[in-house]
Amino acid sequence: MQLTDAQRADFDRDGYVFLPQVFSEQETAVLRSEAERVFALEREEVWRESSGAARTAFAAQTYSEPFRRLGLHPRLVEPVMQLLDGPVYLHQYKVNAKAAFDGEVWQWHQDYGTWARDDGMPEARAMNIALFLDAVTAVNGPLMFIPRSHKQGVFEAGHDLETTSYPLWTLDRETVTRLAEEGGIVAPTGPAGSVLMFHCNLVHASPPNISPWRRTIVYLSLCHVDNHIRQFKRPEWVAHRDFAPIAPLADDCLSELAAGAAAE
């Protein structure tokens, strides 16, 4: 899958591009079912909210066949290779839950700020590509972006160790206010199977989910192989250390699983 010239221009200008319904309902159904299984596991990679509800399952590709295949899917990997102009490796893999009623906030932050400070990633030659496993709406904790904030580099940040179960380098209110006054705030929404690509310096957050509808998104953080991390402070399942370039699987690698599940 390749981005059009218009989509590439949108990404360069705003720092993100939204691609509706890239994956079929059958493909996303396989992954939704697998996410429920993964979130129920008692593993160190599965982080929980203060309520006990699942927050994030890290490195799911290492203990789940459907998520392994997704991490190698050409519809996710090839557009990132196109924008980063070369081979990429998987820096981080997250299945992020926003449980109905109990999904907690993700504070305002930049991902590259964390990757630079904690992992020693040399340059912002990396990005996120995210797949909606549920419909994302205005009420179930959508991802929020400040368009064009990626153009201003890395901002100062404080290390928030208290707000949620996950430590995060967060931006102060004054910085967020200034950026929002300049670029506004958007919250891309759409059906399950939709994809979001966004720059690693784009300022983003998500509010708590107090609705009765869950919201699950899978994030692949992909980095150019020449830009791999240089320090290893965080566990390998948080910041991966296999810098081999991804070789994408065939396009039907997920639909094959969906067909097998339907035949059982």
Image: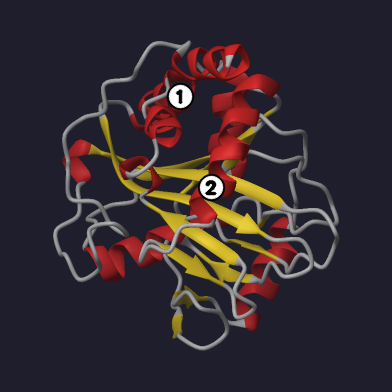
Left or right of 225, for residue 58: right
Residue 225 vs 239, above or below: the answer is: above
On the image, the x and y values in percent for residue 108 come to: 59, 70
- Could you tell me if residue 131 is visible in this image? no
Asked whether, in this view, residue 169 is left or right of residue 185, the answer is: left
- In the drawing, does residue 86 fall left or right of residue 158? left
Q: Amino acid at mark 1?
A: Pro
Q: Earlier in the sequence, mark 1 or mark 2?
A: 2
Horizontal side of residue 38 vs 140, given as left or right? left
> Which residue sits at x=54%, y=76%?
171
Instruction: Please name whichever residue, 170 or 239, is drawn nearer the observer in this view of the structure.
Output: 239
Instruction: Point out residue 10 in the picture as x, y percentages from the top left corner.
Output: 62, 32
Residue at the disc numbered 1? 79
Query: Where 37 sits versus 85, above or below?
Result: below
Q: How many marks?
A: 2
Q: Amino acid at mark 2?
A: Arg
**Judging from the image, what secondary structure is the residue with disc 2 in?**
helix
**Label 2 packing within 10 angstroms: few (<14), some (14-19), many (20+):** few
Q: Nearer the viewer, mark 1 or mark 2?
A: 2
Residue 102 locus on image (x, y percent)? 72, 70
Q: Quadrant of residue 19?
A: top right
Looking at the image, which residue is at 35% across and 66% down? 44
Residue 187 appears in view: yes
Task: Check contact, mark 1 vs mark 2: CB within 8 A.
Answer: no
Residue 37 is labelled as 2
